[in-house]
Each structure stands twice: as C-alpha cells, then as structure tokens.
Image (cartoon, rainbow, N blue to C red):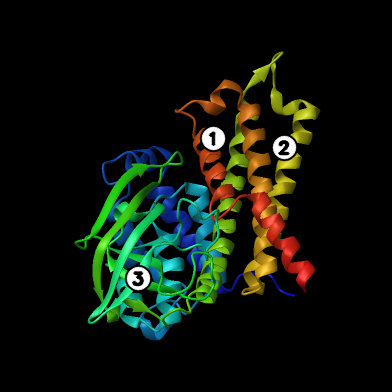
Amino acid sequence: MNFDYSETQTIVRDTLQRFLADRYDFETRQKISRSQAGWSPDIWKAFAEELGILGAPFSEEMGGLGGGPVENMIIMEEIGKSLVVEPYLSTVILGGGFAREAGRTDLIEGIIAGDVRFAFAWAEPKGRYNLDHVEVSATKTGGGYTLSGHKAVVRDAPCATHLIVSARTSGEKADADGISLFVVPADANGVSRTDYPLVDGGTASEITFENLAIGEDALLGQEGAASPVMRKVVDEAIAALCAEGVGVMRQLHKLTMDYTKERKQFGVPISKFQVLQFRMVDMLLEVEQSHSMTLMATLKLPDTAAVAMAKAKVGKGLVFCGQEAVQLHGGNGISDEYAVGHYFKRATMIENQFGPTDHYLRRYERLTMAA
C-alpha cells in the first residue's frame, strides 16, 4: 500500500509549515494565548483566506479543498508542532462534521469563510466521558424547543460564534436513544457562560442554559437519533486529535535532541552519553509508532476499535515523551520560558481529551470482545 501523500496534500502541509514558521513562533503563540481573547482573529482569517485550510475536508462545490480525514490529519499534526490555539478541531472537524451529517451547507460555507466558529457542548459534570450521558433537556414547545441544564468544560466556547449542544428530548439520562443536537448562537439570551483559561494555553467555559427558547431550525439532524452521529463525528475528531498528539511528540523529541546537544557535562554535550541516546531513541520509537497507529485509524474511519486503539497508544506515547523531555531538560523543563514545558502541558491535555488512556483501553477491550 502506498502511504505517500498526494501532491495536493504535500502542498497543504508545506504551505502550512511555512506559514506557522513565519507567523506563529513560540513567542507569538504565547502572546496570543495570554491575550484577553485567547486566540487570534488575524490568524484565523489567514487560515480561511490565505491558506484555505478551513475548507480542507469539505467538497469543492462548497468552496473546500475536496479532502477528508487524511487532510485533517496532516493539518492537525502541524497544529500540534506549533501549539496552535485557534479552534480548528472544534470548528472544522467537530462543527463541520455535525453540519455535514445534518446537510447544513450554510454552516459549512460559514466555516470555510472563517465567519462561523463552533464549540461542542457535550460534557456534563457526572458524564465520565460518556457521550450518551445527557441531562441537559430540550422540551418541545409550540414553536421549537426550550433548553435547560449545564455543560462543563466546553473547549473553545469563549471564541465560538455558535454552540453545538447535545440535549435530551426523551429517555433517561444515560440512554443512547432520545438525544438530539442543536445549534445555538453563543450569545443567545438564556446562555450563561463562565470562561477560564486551560493549563495548555487554550480556553473553555462552563455553560448554563436557562430556559433558552430556540426554533425548530436549531435542530441538527433527526430528533432523538443523535447518539450514532455523535460517535461518528467524535471518532473523526479523536483520530485528528491523535495527529495533533503526534505533532506535539515530534516537537518534544526535537527540542530534547537540540537541548542535549547544547547542554554540557564533564566538558562534553550530554547527547554523547549513550544512556541518554537510548532514551531519545525510545522517544522516537513512541513518535513513529503513534504516527503509524494514527494513520491506520484515520484510514479505517469509521472503525471505532481502530480509533480507540490509536487514542490509547498516542496517550501512552504523549505521557512517555513528555516526561522524558522534561526530565532530560532538568529544571528548564518546567520553566515558563522554555517551550518544552508548554508542549508537555498540551500533551497532558490531549491524553485526557475525550477520555484518558485507560478509558480507551477498556473501550477497545469491550469492542474486540463483542466482535
């Protein structure tokens, strides 16, 4: 099987690499993440208009690049290498995926133009990473629905123009049946938001819906049948998140290699010590194995078991590479001035996003035992 990228995919990767090298170095990224907004509208506009990457997985008829999950994988790895905080995963992959499944071309066109930014409000305080644990209610009214309830740790909500909300229209709180998806303006009356920074430089919100009245056109897809759609789109997002993790690991390995070539002990660079060379080789093995697992999961979508296996492997690799990088940097590894500590923070967050490694090991076991 040929695993080489196509000419178009290579151009997308190389163009994004050059853009991020020129306009998104570590110092710039720190200024953006610590700004009041927590993201850069100018960078987002450039993603849309200069690079066109916001249309990577969408058809050419919609103004996109005609790509799919592989293009998302390529872009997300570069996002991981540069610790990009702009909401590509939340908007293009999650928001765009739900819009695609619901046939909402108007939302997709808004994403491609850079005008629409999404946050996926799915997690709840007692949910334990279960997409089907939904207590937020959507009560049918004469002109639409009324949303009530609380969503927790809604990543990228502070910069979102719209929220995609999972809500229960029937059934009990953990039932797969009876869950619906709704698209809601982020600034709608009845939406209360508490914003806060995350340890990795991103942002999130606690969101409360207080008898929010929405029309029937807010419903995405079929009422009560959102569970399989959520699983499909979230699996696509997890595969892309694994690619971001690979990018983070590659940079952790590179930064560690560079540092050990400069740091001297007993008059020689510590990279000359064989025991440290072995440890850096172990890091590289984790990177390459994680890359292979991510590629397999991406190509096998919508194979849920392959996604679970990749997330577990990448999560293990992120923890290993992050800990090795910090230890080999010594005290510098946890200082705010050195980039490696910030990559370690993002690695830790990716390992836990949508569920930690143990969660996906158990999920993979259940899926394979049931097959």
Report if the CB atoms under discs 2 and 3 are less than 8 Å apart: no
Residue 280's tag is 2
Which residue shows up at 38% across the image and 43% down it? 29
- Residue 218, relative to residue 19: is it above or below? below
Please say whether residue 44 is visible from this viewpoint. Answer: yes
Q: Judging from the image, what secondary structure is the residue with disc 1 in?
A: helix
Q: Judging from the image, what secondary structure is the residue with disc 2 in?
A: helix
Residue 138's tag is 3
Which residue shows up at 77% across the image and 25% down it? 273
- Residue 63, relative to residue 94: is it above or below? below
Q: Which residue is mark 1?
A: 340
Tell which of 279 and 196 is nearer to you.
Answer: 196
3D distance between C-alphas at marks 1 and 2: 15 Å
Quick one: which residue is furthest to the bottom in this view?
61
Q: Position of residue 315 (x, y in %)?
A: 64, 49
Q: Judging from the image, what secondary structure is the residue with disc 3 in?
A: strand
Tell which of 50 and 41 is nearer to you.
Answer: 41
- Residue 228, relative to residue 46: is it above or below? below
